[in-house]
Amino acid sequence: MTRHGGRSGARELAAMVLVATALVASSCHPSNRVEMQVRVVSAKPLGRGDLLLAAKAMDERLDAMGRGSATANVTDAGIDVTVPDVGADSAEGQRLAAELVRPGRVLFRPLLDPPVRATDATLSPTDAANVAADREVVADAAPTADGAVLRFRLGPAAATQNAVVRTEVTSSGSTAGVTVRLAADDRARSLLDLRRACERSAPRCPATLPGANGQPVGSIALVLDGAVLAASPVDPSNDGAWRVASGLTSDLARSLGARLESPPLPAEFVVRRSTTVSVP
């Protein structure tokens, strides 16, 4: 009995030594983190309240991109961002830096004409990011898989992301989509009115794409920082939810979801410095 207990104790001690060795090896294995200094591009500095709002928006963006352990903290000089397990010069580090300082302004605009290839378009694009929301614009989308660029003539904006209270990212095979639920108050009234106009193919939202059961319905474009990210026909049968985008990559869908649930940045920001730090 004593010998058996001794062998058992020896095995337990050996197991503890192995676990401890593994823990020490793991703690000694170096990893990287990127530290970014994000600063306002403005002659007039932002107040602390606006900086806190900007830092919160950056936190939400990082979380949506799968970087929930990252932090964005307000300092006397601006905002300092730390992202573990990524290098500043890596493709992922550069992508995160670009997404952090993107203005993030979302507008919902009706399509006035079917989209056409930019090479065939007769209208030149306007500076859609800086044109007043109550004006028509001509905006492009990102290139398609075959390199083509689609150009859209869009009507005045009906709403911003303030009309959205919740988003859901759904996956289908290798692509993902984003569905939104709208506010039930005045924030979404203009967008709801536009949806009804699209259902009726009203002049402010004429039929441009085939709808369900072959019935023509109007389409609404989701415009992010002046570029058309998606254009979806309105589905009259679904009042509670609206699928605003589909066929996106998972990363882009999560990033869009974060944009729709958070306000745009209150000013223009730039990453002044991005440094890789080795963490023991």
Image (cartoon, rainbow, N blue to C red):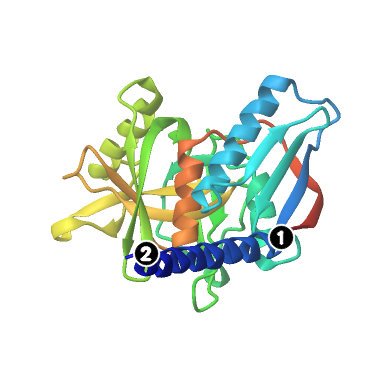
**Which is nearer the eye, 235 or 169?**
169
Depth check: 120 or 52 in front? 52
Mark toward the start of the polypeptide (1 vs 2): 2
* Residue 24, image quadrant: bottom right
Residue at 51%, 43% (x, y): give it.
259
Q: Quadrant of residue 79?
A: top right
Q: Taking the image as drawn, is residue 204 in sight?
A: no
Q: Nearer the viewer, mark 1 or mark 2?
A: 2
- Give the amino acid type for the residue marked by disc 1 in the picture: Asn
Q: Nearer the viewer, residue 240 or 215?
A: 240
Which label number is shown at residue 32? 1
Which residue is identified by label 2? 2
CA gap, disc 1 to disc 2?
Answer: 50 Å
Look at 26% across and 42% down and name the residue there. 241
Secondary structure under the numbered disc 1 in the rendered image: strand
Please give the label number shown on residue 69.
none
> Looking at the image, do the residues carrying marks 1 and 2 touch, with CB atoms under 8 Å apart?
no
Quadrant where the N terminus is found in the figure: bottom left
Q: Quadrant of the C terminus?
A: bottom right
Amino acid type, mark 2: Thr
Is residue 9 something one can see in this rendering?
Answer: yes
Report helix, strand or loop for mark 2. helix
Disc 1 crowd rating (10 Å Cα; few below 14, some 14-19, many 20+) is: some
Residue 204 in percent (x, y) is at 37, 40
Expressed as whole percent of the image width and height from the top left, the position of residue 21 reads 60, 66
Q: Residue at x 36, y 57 (%)?
A: 177
Residue drawn at (56%, 45%) of the image = 61
